[in-house]
């Protein structure tokens, strides 16, 4: 009996575009989606570039004085991605709302700094240290709806307004691995009979004044002044020194493959295996032995039950940080054996790190690779780190791919892997 789960539709708002055609074109030709940040003043930051979709890069926020702040970027991206999803397929056409669920990897929305400035001005310098007056002014200033929008579940509500599902639903706040874990959990929910179809993916809008300052403060992002913005994300390169932040939203519909095939629907990708783990050794650095990476990869590959030589390439987490890239490739060598690691790529070199939406973004990239028969190159790879002893893809390879291992690793040691299969290569 075929119990396979597949991806049957997508909706996207990404630094590389909204459609599979746009994303595939960027990935095939090494075209960067990293651009200058326009939505707020970056003059006091080292980081002035990011993977920001054109849609979310308008200068409508700080330092402009605002009458009222617009809704958080997470809700904008979620709404547009859901609209894109519905343009391909509406699961309500085939399923009862109670049998449609949703699991979304999401970041916690942030208050824009302009709101704090406006509130401070309302309170006045004489009363700024008077707690009762500050609370009274805050109560007067903030709307209840704005507080609701700052809850992570607001993303689920945004999607549900367009697709009124009532089934099994979760928010996943696992940072960099959130959306890949959401995909694995949604697949399992269908296999367990909790739902017949799942809306799943990731939404992130972390390019804000506060978040960018925090990333620079902890040294997570590349601030090398000798590198242009489009050159700073350089996975596996000797000069890598941090990731390039990015944002956007990628949503999918997951269903049983038999149901999709029976209605002649789009089978974009089969999910063959899922693995997750947690190291909890350090808040930022990976486990010193790469334990969480090994466990999630091994678990996904065991579930997929494929020979090692059947993997066409690895879509790595590949953040362009010193530790991640070294640890991830070391574990790949241990699992596949020296000299047997499939080609390794990281598309973060072109679109940056979408945090909670990163895994979903990169799964969409794998779908583009399956459809158009190519393995994307790692751009900005000028000199591969000699300690990274795996075959990194330095130039786009045009070839058919059958199975791909996709990794996502997050802060705190959260880790996830999926084994993805090309439906065009199925027997």
Image: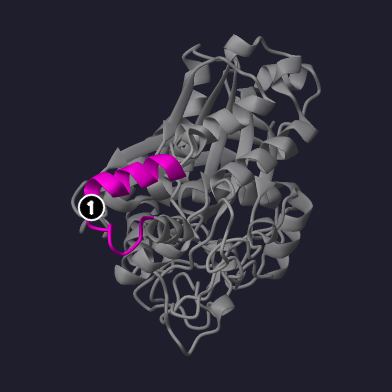
Q: Is residue 356 left or right of residue 65?
A: left
From the viewer's perspective, is residue 64 above or below residue 146?
Answer: below
**Can residue 10 be seen from the camera position used here?**
yes
- Image quarter of residue 218: bottom left
Residue 254 magenta-highlighted: no
Q: Residue furthest front?
A: 126
CA neighbours of label 1 inside 10 A, class few (<14), some (14 to 19), many (20+): few
**Which region is colored magenta?**
123-141
* Residue at the (63%, 52%) spot, across then down: 365
Q: How many marks?
A: 1
Quadrant position of the N terminus in the picture = top right
Residue highlighted by disc 1: 130
- Image quarter of residue 198: top right
The spot of residue 251 in percent (x, y) is 61, 38
The spot of residue 55 in percent (x, y) is 69, 56
Between 135 and 210, the residue placed more toward the observer is 135
* Residue at the (31%, 70%) spot, across then down: 217
From the viewer's perspective, is residue 356 above or below residue 155?
Answer: below
The spot of residue 139 in percent (x, y) is 39, 40
Residue 129 magenta-highlighted: yes
Between 278 and 229, the residue placed more toward the observer is 229
**Can residue 273 be seen from the camera position used here?**
no
* Residue at the (20%, 59%) spot, across then down: 288
């Amino acid at each position: 009996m075929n119990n396979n789960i597949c991806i049957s539709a997508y909706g996207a708002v990404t630094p590389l575009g909204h459609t599979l055609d746009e994303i595939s074109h960027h990935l095939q030709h090494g075209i960067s989606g990293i651009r200058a940040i326009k939505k707020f003043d970056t003059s006091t930051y080292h980081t002035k570039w990011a993977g920001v979709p054109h849609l979310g890069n308008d200068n409508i926020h700080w330092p402009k004085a605002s009458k009222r702040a617009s809704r958080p970027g997470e809700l904008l991206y979620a709404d547009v991605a859901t609209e894109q999803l519905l343009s391909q397929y509406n699961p309500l056409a085939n399923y009862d709302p109670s049998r449609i669920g949703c699991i979304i990897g999401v970041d916690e929305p942030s208050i824009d700094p302009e709101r704090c400035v406006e509130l401070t001005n309302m309170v006045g310098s004489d009363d700024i240290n008077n707690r009762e007056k500050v609370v009274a002014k805050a109560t007067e200033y903030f709307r209840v709806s704005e507080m609701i929008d700052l809850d992570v579940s607001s993303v689920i509500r945004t999607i549900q307004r367009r697709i009124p599902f009532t089934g099994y639903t979760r928010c996943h706040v696992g940072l960099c691995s959130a959306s890949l874990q959401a995909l694995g959990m949604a697949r399992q929910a269908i296999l367990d009979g909790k739902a017949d179809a799942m809306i799943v993916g990731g939404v992130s809008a972390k390019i804000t004044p506060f978040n960018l300052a925090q990333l620079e403060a902890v040294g997570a992002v590349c601030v090398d002044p000798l590198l242009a913005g489009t050159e700073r994300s350089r996975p596996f390169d000797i000069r890598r020194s941090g990731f390039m932040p990015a944002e956007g939203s990628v949503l999918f519909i997951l269903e049983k493959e038999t149901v999709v095939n029976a209605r002649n629907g789009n089978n974009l990708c089969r999910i063959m295996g899922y693995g997750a783990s947690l190291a909890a050794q350090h808040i930022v650095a990976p486990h010193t032995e790469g334990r969480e990476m090994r466990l999630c990869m091994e678990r996904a590959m065991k579930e997929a039950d494929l020979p090692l030589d059947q993997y066409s390439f690895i879509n790595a987490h590949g953040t362009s940080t010193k530790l991640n890239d070294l640890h991830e490739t070391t574990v790949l060598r241990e699992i596949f054996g020296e000299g047997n690691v499939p080609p390794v790529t990281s598309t973060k070199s072109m679109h940056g790190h979408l945090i909670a939406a990163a895994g979903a973004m990169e799964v969409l990239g794998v779908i583009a690779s399956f459809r158009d028969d190519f393995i994307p190159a790692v751009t900005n790879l000028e000199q591969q780190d000699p300690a990274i002893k795996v075959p990194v893809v330095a130039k786009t390879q045009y070839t058919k791919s059958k199975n791909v291992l996709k990794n996502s690793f997050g802060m705190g040691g959260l880790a996830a892997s999926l084994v993805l299969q090309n439906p065009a290569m199925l027997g």
